[in-house]
Amino acid sequence: MFSNILIVCMGNICRSPMAEGILKHVLAIAGKTDRSVSSAGLGALTGYEADPMACQLMAQKGLDISAHRARQLTDHMIHKADLILVMETWQKTAIETRIPSARGKVFRLGEWEKIDIDDPYRKDESEFIRSMTLIEKAVAQWAAKL
């Protein structure tokens, strides 16, 4: 069982906070409250709030990620996680290169669709919506398997 799930993107202010909020919500609805879900960034904007557009889109879905603060990914987080979900193939490679023992527990969030989820940072609302839509679909696929 995957009891400690870590979601990783680059800055930890757009994609991973949205994915964290959505996955927590989906797991709670499914009664899977024994799972811990958190997020971090490979190049985190440490201490920053989630991007305002990410917060707005999540609020429209009834999810509040306004308390989120970006965290830098650490070796301890990698070791502690049972499952690490990244947004892009290069992020998977970066984590597995950094901690070779992480191989086998790092997957793309879009693994089942064989897609990367592009970073909407500093882009317009349509790019945030596109990323969020892909995240929602990918989270649903993962949640069904958790």
Image (cartoon, rainbow, N blue to C red):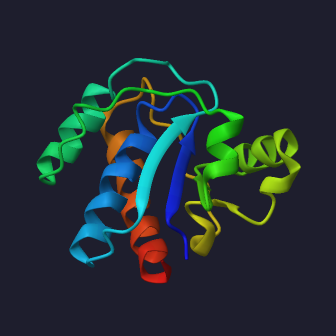
The structure residue drawn at horizontal position 48% and vertical position 77%, both measured from the top left corner, is 146
Is 48 in front, or is 128?
48
Decide: is 123 above or below 56.
above
Outermost residue, bottom side: 144
Residue 62 vertical position relative to residue 143 in the rendered view, above or below: above
Residue 18 placement (x, y as % from top left): 35, 46
Residue in view at x 45 percent, y 28 percent: 121
Q: Quadrant of residue 123?
A: top left
Give above or below for 46 relative to 66.
above
Residue 79 image offset from top left, x and y in percent: 70, 49
**Residue depicted at 63% across the width and 50% down the height:** 80
Residue 43 on image: x %, y %: 62, 24
Question: In terms of image quadrants, where is residue 55?
Answer: top left
- Displayed quadrant of residue 77: top right
In the displayed structure image, the side of residue 14 where residue 114 appears, left or right:
right
Q: Is residue 85 left or right of residue 94?
A: left
Quadrant assignment for the N terminus? bottom right
* Percent of width and height locating residue 105: 70, 63
Q: Vertically, is 96 above or below 47?
A: below
| Residue in the picture at 63% in, 59% down | 108
The number of numbered discs placed on residues in the rendered structure image is 0
